[in-house]
Each structure stands twice: as structure tokens, then as C-alpha cells.
Image (cartoon, rainbow, N blue to C red):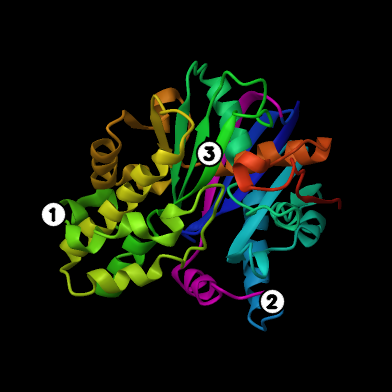
């Protein structure tokens, strides 16, 4: 077993999650300590300004240095590590176009940290015809085994974008046919965050309180089922900005009604996603910041008509699950094991993504 530190900075761009996992890349032996390294408001502005940029853009050098420095500070807080999994900060994601771009050079981080670093997790999957996302499903399979699930469960991550993994823990392994189905569902918290930032200056809807005081304008959601992303069969993935035009539909609403309508959009996209499952999930387990939004969680229960709980209900850490996932994936990359498959990203075959840089 290796003691691996996973690092994740997601589409919410609030900071770096860092978590230690003891694993061989197949099973979870133990969960270790974790920490959060926040971005300052000014750093978040710099990162937001970089959304949509590709590596050749002049502004990317500053962003890369910022991302790497923040991650290096996170790594410095841990001892006794064998390996680091470094996701970087996604600036652009167009798997059927330019590809995918995560700012942050793992080779330089390895030199600074004095540890081997696995990075650039998504590029090999895209090169193999995959979406490059989501990459967490193989870890979700290990989590389902860890919690001793006996029937299909759905892990829903609500960060800036929502993504789901349907897991059948009865399968032989994550690469097995029928073991997994994974894809992005639609907006997570990003639209609500952007809407409230513009209207009230708030960074997010704490606890879903603003949305909880509003009324959903159902007319704004009336044609959601016909949206080209919703109708497209998985595997599939989104860029943070792909549903951004939906903000125009709520621009005339009060902050409360707009937040409520966008929360309903998140929940409705999840409900639509469940139609693609091979068989119904017996339970939804939610991680990411969205699990703290009580309004979204209530809407999910109503729209899916299934038990919906934060992952803490089964002893997992909803704040650190993605960071733990990249620790798990780093261990798999070091062993040459697959990190994605046709059922999770649409790649032509199971792919072991990621590069290893040693100090």
C-alpha cells in the first residue's frame, strides 16, 4: 500500500482540497488526514479570467504559477508521502474540439515538493476518443465496495458542474462491462454562484437559504428535456460555461426566485440523467459543496423519488472525495492500471492516463 496525497482544485475555484489515501489503486486501505488551501478573492478573479484559455494564451503563465504555488503550499503540510496526484485547474474542456486544458505543471511541482507527481490525467483519455471526464468513477467503485454496498448506488458530485457515477458493486471490477456508467449531469453550483455574485455580491448560496425563500419559475425549465446535452446519450461531459446562457432566463427574477429556479435546474438535470441508468439506483450519495444546499437536496429527493443523502451518511468525506479520488488514480497510474473506460468517458478502450514526473 502507498500513502498518496491527492490534490483537487475544481470548477468552483474556491481553493485546493488535499487528502491522503492509503491504497494500492484497487482497494481503499485507509483514509488519512486532509486539508484545504483556499484561493484569495484576487486569485479567484485571476482564475475566472482564465476560463476558456488554452496553453498558448499569454495569461496562462501567471495562472499556472499561481496554481502550482498554491498546490505546493498544500503539499508542504503533509509528511510521510510516497506519491502525489495533481489534477491542476481546468481552464478549458472541449474533448471534441481542442481537447482539455488543466493549468499546473506536475514536473515543476515534483521538483519543488521532492516527491513523484502524477499529473495530466485527462489528455490520454481524450486522445483515445474519450471525454476526459469524469475520472472519479473508478474511485467510486472502490468506495461502493468500501461501504459494502450490495446493489446499484449513484454517487453525485455537485461542484461547479454536476457529475454522476452509477455503480454496480456486484461487478468483478471497475473495468468490467456493466460495472459503471458515468457522465456530467448539468450545472451544479456554478450558475447559482455566478447569478448571486452578479446580483448580490455573494460568492454562493449558503445552505440554500436564498433559493429556499424563492419560487421556481417552471416556465424557464419547460424545454429542458429537449436540450441537446440532456438528450445526448452518455458518456458525455461539460465545460463549466456550457449552460451559462441559462442565466439569461432568470435575469428578470429576484435573487430569491432566480436562485430557486437555478437550483431546480440542477435537480431537474440530475433527474433527467437517471433515465440513462441500466437499472435504478437504490440510493443517491451526494458529495461536493452542493450537498450543503438544503434546497437542492430537497429538490433532488422530490425529482428523483429516491433516497438522497450526503456521503457522510455512509462514513465518507464529501469535501475531500475528489481529492481522495486523484490519490487513488495516481496509485493506479503508477501501476499501469486503467483510470477510465468506455463506460465512464467513452474512450475506445480502458485507458491509463496521467504522466509521472519524479524529482
Image vertical order of residue 41 relative to residue 266, above or below: below
The location of residue 11, given as percent across then percent down, is: 50, 59
User: Can you see residue 197?
Assistant: no
Q: Secondary structure at mark 2?
A: helix
**The N terminus sits in image quarter:** top right
Residue 161 position in % (x across, y down): 45, 55
Q: CA distance from mark 2 to mark 3?
A: 29 Å
Q: Are marks 2 and 1 in contact (CB under 8 Å)?
A: no
Residue wearing tag 3: 321
Mark number for residue 213? Answer: 1
Q: Position of residue 201 (x, y in %)?
A: 29, 71
> Gap in Å between the C-alphas at discs 2 and 1?
43 Å
Left or right, 96 with reference to 40: right
Task: Identify which residue is drawn at 75% across, 36% down.
Answer: 332
Asked which secondary structure carries label 3, the reply is helix
Number of numbered labels in the structure image: 3
Q: Residues within 10 Å of mark 1 (few under 14, many from 20)?
A: few
Identify the mark nearer the N-term, 2 or 1.
2
| Residue located farthest toward the bottom when viewing the structure as drawn | 58
| In the image, farthest residue toward the right | 359
Q: Is residue 49 magenta?
A: yes
Q: Which is more foreground, mark 2 or mark 1? A: 1
Of 284 and 71, which appears nearest the observer?
284
Q: What's the residue at 31%, 47% (across, down)?
A: 267
First in residue order: circle 3 vs circle 1: 1
101 or 20: nearer the eye?
Answer: 101
Q: Which residues are magenta?
A: 26-55
Q: Is residue 236 left or right of residue 280?
A: right
Name the residue nearer the viewer: 307 or 181: 181
- The residue that label 2 is drawn on is 61
Amino acid at each position: 500500500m502507498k500513502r498518496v496525497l491527492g490534490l483537487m482544485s475544481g470548477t468552483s475555484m474556491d481553493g485546493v482540497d488535499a487528502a491522503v489515501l492509503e491504497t494500492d489503486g484497487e482497494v481503499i486501505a485507509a483514509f488519512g488526514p486532509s486539508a484545504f488551501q483556499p484561493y484569495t478573492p484576487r486569485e479567484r478573479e485571476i482564475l475566472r479570467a482564465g476560463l476558456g484559455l488554452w496553453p498558448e494564451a499569454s495569461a496562462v503563465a501567471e495562472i499556472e504559477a499561481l496554481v502550482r504555488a498554491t498546490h505546493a503550499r498544500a503539499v508542504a503540510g503533509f509528511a510521510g508521502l510516497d506519491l502525489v496526484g495533481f489534477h491542476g485547474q481546468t481552464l478549458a474542456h472541449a474533448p471534441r474540439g481542442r481537447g482539455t486544458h488543466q493549468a499546473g505543471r506536475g514536473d515543476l511541482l515534483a521538483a519543488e515538493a521532492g516527491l513523484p507527481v502524477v499529473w495530466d490525467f485527462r489528455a490520454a483519455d481524450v486522445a483515445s476518443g474519450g471525454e476526459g471526464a469524469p475520472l472519479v468513477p473508478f474511485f467510486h467503485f472502490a468506495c461502493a465496495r468500501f461501504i459494502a454496498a450490495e446493489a446499484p448506488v449513484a454517487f453525485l458530485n455537485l461542484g461547479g458542474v454536476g457529475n454522476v457515477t452509477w455503480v454496480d458493486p456486484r461487478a468483478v471490477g471497475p473495468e468490467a462491462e456493466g460495472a459503471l456508467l458515468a457522465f456530467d449531469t448539468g450545472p451544479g453550483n456554478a450558475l447559482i454562484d455566478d447569478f448571486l455574485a452578479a446580483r448580490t455580491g455573494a460568492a454562493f448560496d449558503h445552505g440554500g437559504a436564498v433559493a429556499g425563500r424563492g419560487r421556481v419559475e417552471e416556465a424557464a425549465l419547460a424545454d429542458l428535456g429537449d436540450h441537446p446535452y440532456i438528450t445526448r446519450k452518455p458518456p458525455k461531459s461539460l465545460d463549466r460555461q456550457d449552460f451559462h446562457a441559462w442565466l439569461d432566463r432568470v435575469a428578470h427574477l429576484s435573487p430569491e426566485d432566480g436562485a430557486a429556479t437555478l437550483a431546480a435546474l440542477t435537480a431537474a438535470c440530475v433527474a433527467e440523467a437517471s433515465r440513462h441508468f441500466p437499472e435504478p439506483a437504490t440510493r443517491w450519495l451526494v458529495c461536493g459543496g452542493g450537498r450543503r444546499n438544503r434546497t437542492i437536496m430537497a429538490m433532488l429527493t422530490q425529482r428523483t423519488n429516491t433516497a438522497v443523502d450526503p456521503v457522510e451518511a455512509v462514513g465518507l468525506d464529501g469535501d475531500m472525495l475528489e481529492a481522495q479520488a486523484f490519490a487513488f488514480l495516481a496509485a493506479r497510474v503508477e501501476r499501469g492500471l486503467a483510470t477510465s473506460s468506455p463506460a465512464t468517458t467513452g474512450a475506445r478502450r480502458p485507458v491509463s492516463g496521467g504522466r509521472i514526473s519524479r524529482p
